[in-house]
Amino acid sequence: LHFSEEERERAMAAAEQEQFYLLLGNLLSPDNAVRKQAEETYENIPGQSKITFLLQAIRNTAAAEEARQMAAVLLRRLLSSAFEEVYPALSPDDQTSIKSGLLLIIQLETQSSMRKKICDIVAELARNLIDEDGNNQWPEVLKFLFDSVSSQNVGLREAALHIFWNFPGVFGNQQQHYLEVIKRMLVQCMQDQEHPSIKTLSARAAAAFVLANEHNLPLLKHFADLLPGILQAVNDSCYQNDDSVLKSLVEIADSVPKYLRPQLEPTLQLSLKLCADASLSNMQRQLALEVIVTLSETAAAMLRRHTNIVAQAIPQMLAMMVDLEEDEDWANADELEDDDFDSNAVAGESALDRMACGLGGKLVLPMIKEHIMQMLQNPDWKYRHAGLMALSAIGEGCHQQMEGILNEIVNFVLLFLQDPHPRVRYAACNAIGQMATDFAPGFQKKFHEKVIAALLQTMEDQGNQRVQAHAAAALINFTEDCTKLVLEQVVTSIASVADTAEEKFVPYYDLFMPSLKHIVENAVQKELRLLRGKTIECISLIGLAVGKEKFMQDASDVMQLLLKTQTDFSDLEDDDPQISYMISAWARMCKILGKEFQQYLPVVMGPLMKTASIKPEVALLDTQDMENMSDDDGWEFVNLGDQQSFGIKTAGLEEKATACQMLVCYAKELKEGFVEYTEQVVKLMVPLLKFYFHDDILLTNSPSMPLLLECARVRGPEYLTQMWHFMCDALIKAIGTEPDSDVLSEIMHSFAKCIDVMGDGCLNNEHFEELGGILKGKLEEHFKNQELRQVKRQDEDYDEQVEESLQDEDDNDVYVLTKVSDVLHSIFSSYKEKVLPWFERLLPLIVNLICPHRPWPDRQWGLCIFDDIVEHCSPSSFKYAEYFLRPMLQSICDNSPEVRQAAAYGVGVMAQFGGDSYRPFCTEALPLLVRVIQSPDAKTKENVNATENCISAVGKIMKFKPDCVNVEEVLPHWLSWLPLHEDKEEAVYTFNYLCDLIESNNPVVLGPNNSNLPRIFGIIADGEIHEAIKHEDPCIKRLANVVRQVQTSGQLWTECISQLNADQQAAIQELLNSA
């Protein structure tokens, strides 16, 4: 027998294909090892061969169904993740045969779920075949869509809609041209009464098309009349047990709420109706509620016009919260799990919380108050439970409105700590805990006594033995098998009491500490780990509360216990709850012990670095994969658009954040004592500046940078510079890319502090170039955002609550502006005038900040930047005088105290550092400064800082530019304005100048025969009373010397002292003792 070459090749190919079927089978194997091996084998097949094998498997209708489906999923993934590597390398003939092959398979396929999977491949391929200019390189797919959508074959109609739903951008730059056709096709399909699947799919496709064109306003208007059809499909599909269209509606509410405006009433009515229908599944009812809740977040102003709907939605949420199970074992359950994640009760509570935050308490509180009051009086425990949980949920959103009536609320909730039903008592504890968070710190200050008393009384009532026995019996009944749980809660309560009471806890210290130490020593069984962890936390909190002196008697015992736990750490599992408690406890011990803590670092740092280095699992997924994963708990997803999502497993992130905080704490407390570890910490922290998944980690990390540089200083300049080089690029990059304004502000603040530490020469030309571009961008964005807010103020839905949120945005922007100012301040103070040529690219933007029509924070921070230039870059600063001098002088008497303060400070530094060119302007500024100082409300709380800066500026003009002013005439006035005590820096400055004048025996200051001395003593005493000057400041010594000199001349001393009141006399004594 002789095989021809062709036959032999065919046989080989068949054998290889056979192998591939086996591989597909193994990829689906339940056995992990088999599956892993198969995955490796699959990965190693070259891309083009993969395509051939996969297509072959998909085509082969005789192959096993699972294998074909698996092949389809793999092909879609391959095109999604590796298109550029695989497809362009195929020959044009192969490309054409793949394209036509796929369309043919769709037409021949009989099995509907398989057909869908092939449509997904077609959509993926089409997505990749649209070029930069929007040309679709696969025109046949468009023809296929048009032919199929009007075909008699339902399967083909479904296929066309499915492809269009998966990739609504399939028409590329032809979309406008085909717009009418697309619309007609969707409308026709949405009216198909015979085939529910077509109605559903076309509604989803229409929604996807709207979402894909969310910024194209004319198109959204043009497609507005599709909305009633979409709503009809939402309703119909829900009753066919399909919530896919409802999910699309939630997406529209989230991304394009304005599209719903013309049909907002019917949309809301439909959502309410579905939410209230108990015959639907919990998931569907919650999704329907989600439409309303999402709109309260994305289109609050639009929804506030439909108060009737909001008023009906609230009882709906409350009704969901009553949907609780009777659970016999609840009180004995070992871990109090949150109720099921998907339960109605949890969903209702979260919806209420979000709606209150979205719509604001002004609207929500009056609507819900009566409902909650009625629920709390209901004999059924579930209603009371729900009422208390609702009260907890709305605290954040109704913060302002509840604050006024907090006293009544607290008194009312405390009554439920004695409710006959344990779960209601639990809900009351929950409400108290939540309010303590939402209304801190005022809540703790106002109510600590009654709240702590009530909580402790819930556990014991000393005065009445019967009540005590009854309470104990009740506790024992509820806690037969969970004394550990009660202990955990007791320990947590003690910790929070100590944390709030601080030094007032000292009398109770000896009562609790022995028992707590006992728990740590003896609670070593695995099921007691959490209790032990919480106790360790409690001990360290108490130590921090009562202070080093009281705690020292137990400090070494506690350290030994912690060290023992730590050395057994190698046996602890990674998820042991004790780890994070231990890490926080060490940091508190470090705060208590200060430098003495250094000896323990070698033991502490191992587990700390391990936790801080946790690498989270991340994955890039497309929407299809995500649907399979969302059930797997512990993953969070960020939608990247275009059917792609980024997933991260959140387990361990909280611990990572805590560990990073602790590292910062050690660097801060131990300074050079931490130097051994700076290098490894820097190597860990710097890459985390790009860590987008957890704001706390970013907020912790950036402040660590300047602290770590401080620690490293003892190793000498070379080591320090190397470390700085490692940080600097990453910090600048992070300033350029960080999206969250809080985190960005922290990073900028940190960067400024680092420049302060490193000083002149720490930035090279590339750094300056990049930084200049970034700061310019930030300032331009600042102006652009202000304009956008003005546009929003013209919107038809604009109301006072929109104004509130615009104000918040404004505050965020200003906060970033303050940090731009910080960075420039550090650069000017380190580099002086040689940095001015670099600054000139920013100059027009800074000049724009101080224009008279700009909001006061812009003018304030613009002036601050020019103040820095005068202070650090004179005399060269005068070349910019034409831009800032007039605005600065005009701002001395501005309506805004913040602007006045910045202007007055500027005049002070002009006098002190500016040089001769500024002389005439000092003369011109003087009467303006005096006018501010002498205005009747100069010393009120909001004005005092500006006024003190004016007083200080007058002093600086007299000292540094005496020929610009009649010193003898001004001095008596200046003395009458002293002392300064709010602005500590200026206070030190003015006291030093006062000492200069006294030490040089200035006749105006001392008066004839020293008659002004009692007045000067009064000034010094008041300064001391207000702690205007820190005791370590050299100025204190000068003031004390002035006082001592007078002390030697008996008569004068008696005269001075006799004119002071008791407080002032004590202050003079205190001054003499301290210096």
Image: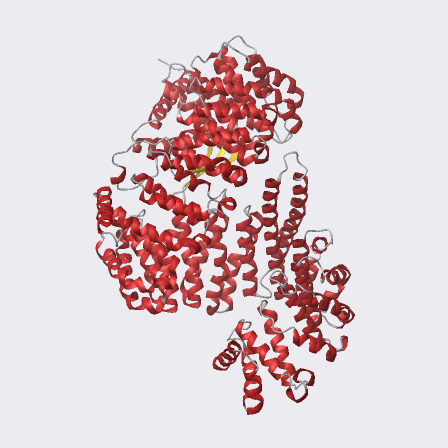
Which residue shows up at 36% across the image and 37% down it? 385
Residue drawn where x is 60% and y is 30% of the image: 258
Q: Is residue 1009 above or below residue 723?
A: below
* Coloration of the structure image: secondary structure
Residue 460 vertical placement versus 347 (above, below): below
State the image coordinates of residue 250 (x, y, percent, origin top left). Answer: 51, 29
Of 31 and 477, the residue lying toward us: 477
Q: Nearer the viewer, residue 620 or 332?
A: 332
The quarter of the picture where residue 511 lies is: bottom left
Residue 1024 on image: x %, y %: 53, 75
Apparent side of residue 117 relative to residue 299 in the rendered image (left or right): left
Viewer-proximal residue among 503 and 14: 503
Q: Quadrant of residue 243?
A: top left
Residue 237 position in % (x across, y down) = 47, 18
Residue 103 visible somewhere in the drawing: no
Q: Is residue 195 left or right of residue 471?
A: right
In this view of the protein, which residue sits in the foreground, 369 or 571?
Answer: 369
Residue 458 visible in image: yes
On screen, 685 above or below 89? below
Residue 826 percent across, percent down from the top left = 60, 62
